[in-house]
Amino acid sequence: MPADLGIAEAASVLRAGGLVAFPTETVYGLGANALDAEAAARIFAAKARPSFDPLISHLADAADLPGLVGPVPPAVAALAERFWPGPLTLIVDRPAVIPPIVTSGLDTMAVRVPDEPSARALIAAAGVPVAAPSANRFGQLSPTRAEHVVAGLGDAVDVVLDGGPTRCGIESTIVDARGAQPVVLRLGALPVEALIEAVGPVEVRSGSSGQPVAPGTLAAHYAPRTPLRLGAADGDGGRRGLLAFRARPATGDWAAVEVLSPEGDPTVAAARLFDALHRLDAAGVTEIVAEPVPEVGLGRAINDRLRRAAATWR
Ligand code: TXA
Ligand code: MG
């Protein structure tokens, strides 16, 4: 249902332990009451998500954080103050009211305040923190439109709020600012450059490994069903599809081409990334060739996702 009309009904579904998919400025989330272990379990079931991959809890307002978790370290508070509402997820200690299933047994919790009016209205109306991973089946492409949610999760969701395409198009940046120097655990829609400008040097530890610091940042993730390879557009594409950064290749014939940003803007490219991949995935091509984008601003987060998508197919 349209996001603005469905809020009251969706909020009561959340309070009753149901699942609501809702738009945020990053990607669509699959929400459940974060205080309700059974509701959280439904998220893991609907996504076929492994139980070791913890969820992000969403609040309506930054002012709600101390009430939920108590005092936070000054650097965490400073980042929340500077970037919330917005595409930044912060790591805090898990309070006792949040059941361990939400954090996959970790004694820390990921939390953020989304910058999307309907999401904040929904969370406020529900009156509880809302645990929400991206609203896709585990390991697959993230949803940036309500249609992607319906196609991927269908009947596993009680309500889908449709707020149109999301503004950022890639997930939030995850930062653990509890220690001496903030650590970026996942590159995302808030560029590292903006973090550095606000708090000084940060460590980026979002590389892939079998035992990642953010357990969900697995080497293989964000994958289309069609095999994907990172590389340049080489000659004739034949039955292959191309995810191009700025332009169609001057020569060569491709079965399908998606151009992310003719003006060469990585922020625009990020907003279009998953939608373009969903379309290429539906185009019936034999392989998707994805051009890496320049490693500046959101370009780093885009390449990070393309590498993980490609790793699924190696
Ligand atoms: O933009 C976003 O963050 C979206 C929207 C819906 O808010 N959500 C999202 O959730 O991307 P998900 O589940 O797809 O990714 C959550 C990431 C996972 O990599 C998970 O491992 C990490 O957050 N995470 C959650 N709790 C954590 C914790 N306590 N410590 C470290 N990483 C954590
Ligand atoms: Mg996800």
Image (tube, rainbow, N blue to C red):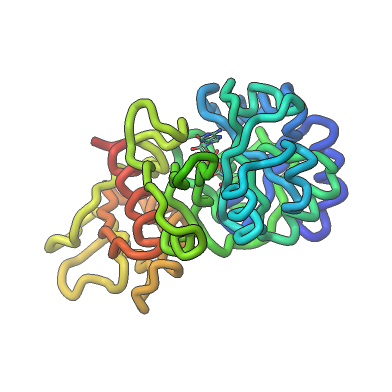
Residue placed furthest toward the left: 235
Q: Nearer the viewer, residue 182 or 32?
A: 182
Q: Nearer the viewer, residue 37 or 48?
A: 37
Numbered circles on residues, count:
0
Displayed-image quarter of ligand 1: top right
- State left or right for residue 22 relative to residue 127: left
Residue found at x 53% / y 28% = 49
At which x and y percent is residue 118?
75, 58
Residue found at x 45% / y 40% = 140
Q: Quadrant of residue 201?
A: bottom left
- State left or right for residue 291 relative to residue 107: left
At which x and y percent is residue 232?
18, 60
* Quadrant containing the C terminus in the rendered view: top left
> From where the camera sits, is residue 287 visible?
yes
Q: Nearer the viewer, residue 125 or 183?
A: 183
Residue found at x 33% / y 64% = 296
- State left or right for residue 306 relative to residue 270: left
Residue found at x 74% / y 61% = 117
> From where the camera sits, is residue 272 visible?
no
At which x and y percent is residue 266?
39, 67
Residue placed furthest toward the bottom: 263
At which x and y percent is residue 69?
72, 36
Q: Nearer the viewer, residue 217 or 137?
A: 217
- State left or right for residue 254 relative to residue 191: left
